[in-house]
Image: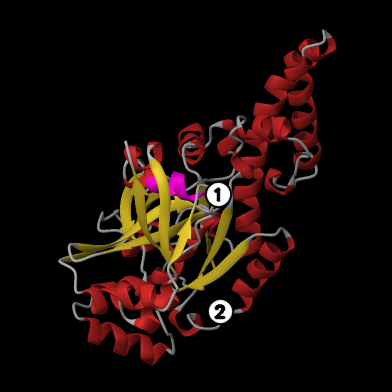
Amino acid sequence: MSLKCGIVGLPNVGKSTLFNCLSSAKAQAANFPFCTIEPNLGVITVPDERLTRLAEIVRPGRIVPATCEIVDIAGLVKGASKGEGLGNKFLGNIRECDAIIHVVRCFDDDNVVREGGMAVDPIADKEIIDTELQLKDLETIDAQLSKTEKAAAAGNKEAKVLVTVLQAYKEVLDKGQNARGVTFDTREEEKAAHDLFLLTTKPVLYVCNVDENSAKTGNAYSKKIEEMAAAEGAEAMVIAAKTEEDIASLESYEDKRLFLDELGLEESGVNRLIKKAYSLLNLQTFITAGEMEVKAWTFHKGWKAPQCAGVIHTDFEKGFIRAEVIKYADYIEYGSEAAVREAGKLGIEGKDYVVQDGDIMHFRFNV
């Protein structure tokens, strides 16, 4: 399931430093614009304490966590929608992603240059990115609207639906707002909207890159971004990318834990970010647990049992009979699958069962 989150932001806000912490693929990090030209792709593991707890009980041969893809995309500048900087290349890379991690500079440092040499202003930085993406979306809409209106006037039903969608998006974008806030009433409208692949309809997580002293509670800069994100129905989080880089460089778990304790953090910002990215992609995890392995399997939130069975193998979905389901809390409480069965806590579920995050599954099938 190759879904990708793209890391975006202005030059020198800490994107590549953050990517280096997230992935084993090392992006170059330097104090000048366009250090990243080609997008860097990293496959990262999703931290999941449940796998460790289950492995302590089952004692499998290996643990296999879930993964997701993170893409470090070159820094954008004002005028990108008209080809400035890396312009269309940058915007094309975003279009290929399923969600956006928008990194915003929320720290003071005279040694790190800001575009134009101006004072740190996270709201202005965010709005530069938003404006460029909105302008590109308007360009996409305007290119389709005139010809689609002609087809709709001639009686084409699909064109009429698309015109409704295009006009709804255009109204919002013309106000300088992102298209992700627009909702539609019918399945046909939702499909037409999806097929436009607009940049500002993608779900977004704002990451406030702060200094080490602000890693736990944020600062005045990050509070502004958090307030703006809340107003548009998006999420925001605080992370100190340079500090995370220092943590990642430590070899032992004990040293990393000591560093986090000194900062007053329960877990690293990178772990929190990966979990949020996974959720941003609308992904969840079901688990299989046996002597060979304890494994996390990725599925889309809302999927039913046969679809999840198909994640393991297409034959599982084709010949689906039933799913045997143990809730994670029950497995931990009773200590084994046999004990869960004896306690009557093992669920036998059919084709309509909506799989829940953390379900421990065993599929019965026949092909």
- Pointer 2 or 1: first along the chain: 2
Horizontal and vertical percent position of residue 219 = 58, 79
Q: Residues within 10 Å of mark 1 (few under 14, many from 20)?
A: few
Q: Is residue 113 visible?
A: no
Tell me how the rendering is colored: secondary structure
Specify the label residue 352 is tagged with: 1
Rendering quarter of residue 64: bottom left
Quadrant for the C terminus, please. top left
Q: Identify which residue is drawn at 74% across, 18% down.
A: 159
Q: Identify which residue is drawn at 40% across, 53% down.
A: 298
User: Which residues make up the magenta segment?
Assistant: 303-309
Horizontal and vertical percent position of residue 244 = 36, 73
Q: In terms of depth relative to the viewer, which is nearer, 335 or 251? A: 335
Q: Can you say whether 344 is above or below 22 in the image? A: below
Instruction: Count how many numbered circles sit on residues in the image.
Output: 2
Q: Is residue 124 visible?
A: yes
Q: Identify which residue is drawn at 60% across, 72% down.
A: 222
Specify the label residue 218 is tagged with: 2
Q: Can you say whether 85 is above or below 66 in the image? A: above
Rendering quarter of residue 318: top left
Rendering quarter of residue 316: top left
In this view, the residue farthest toward the right is 153
Q: Can you say whether 200 is above or below 209 in the image? A: above
The amino acid on which the numbered mark 2 sits, given as a three-letter code, is: Gly
The amino acid on which the numbered mark 1 sits, given as a three-letter code, is: Asp
In this view, the residue farthest toward the top is 154
Q: Is residue 237 magenta?
A: no
Horizontal and vertical percent position of residue 254 = 24, 87
Q: Residues within 10 Å of mark 2 (few under 14, many from 20)?
A: many
Q: Can you say whether 252 is above or below 97 in the image? A: below
Quadrant for the N terminus, please. top left
